[in-house]
Image (cartoon, helix red, strand yellow):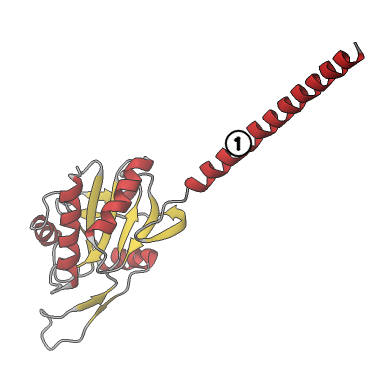
Amino acid sequence: MLQLCCQRKTLHMNRQKLKFNHSWALLALTAYLGLVSSCSVRPYSWQGTPYDPPQPAPEINISNSSGQRYALSEQDGVITLLYFGYTYCPDVCPATVAIMSQVFESLDATPDEIQFIMISVDPERESPEEVAAYLRRFHPDFVGLWADRTELDNIQTDYGIVAIREPSDNPETYLITHTARVFLIDQHGNLRAHYAFGTTPDAFIADLKYLREEQ
């Protein structure tokens, strides 16, 4: 009888030990899965240079080719790619706008999703209509904006843009050395990244797809 009681006691202790070990195993498994999950969710790696944290884009409120006012703050829900250039530029500007054209064709983007804007840094020589016509040669949905010198200087300061007119014997054929950077502004009007000249279409496409998914 005593032997039977001891066996039952031993069996009970083994069951308790098994339950204890099982509980610890479940706890360890839960902790491991949580660790794996946290490690697998990594911050997005931007192809451009990110703004960390994002910051509100300075307001832009200037004329478009039809003489109406364009306000960046009224583009809620639209991803904006912003560039400062001029139509007489012989190399950097056409190359940049051509890359933008490739990006838009690849994404099949509509103007209410993504827009590309170029602000002229040469208002003394080109009109709003000329800027718009220049951009339409690359893509029908691209937006050309024009500002008078006072407005333009303020916007360039806000975005850290440098545009210097080079000396020329002919006042009609001068060149402008300018910052060739593209700014990415998200659907909520925040600066998210900027891109140096020569950034590939694939880099823009990757970041734009991320913003679409984030929305």
Q: In this view, does 72 lie above or below 1?
A: below
Q: Quadrant of the C terminus?
A: top left
Q: Residue furthest bottom?
A: 169
Q: Is residue 94 above or below residue 67?
A: below
Decide which of 157, 115 is in the foreground and name it: 115
Report which quarter residue 95 is drawn in: bottom left
Q: How many marks?
A: 1
Pointer 1 residue: 29
How far from the left and from the top, in percent, is residue 116?
22, 53
Report which quarter residue 8 is drawn in: top right
| Amino acid type, residue under disc 1 in the picture | Leu
Q: Look at the numbered disc 1 and give the secondary structure of its residue.
A: helix
How far from the left and from the top, in percent, is residue 106?
17, 49
Position of residue 47 in the picture relative to residue 111 (left or right)? right
Decide which of 195, 163 is in the foreground and name it: 195
Density class for disc 1 (Cα within 10 Å; few <14, some 14-19, many ≥20) is: few
Decide which of 13, 100 is in the foreground and name it: 13
Position of residue 69 in the picture relative to residue 155 (left or right)? left
Report which quarter residue 81 is drawn in: bottom left
* Residue occupying the point 30% across, 50% down: 208
Q: Is residue 112 above or below residue 137?
A: above
How far from the left and from the top, in percent, is residue 27?
66, 34
Q: Which residue lies furthest to the top in this view?
A: 1
Q: In which quarter of the image is the N terminus?
A: top right
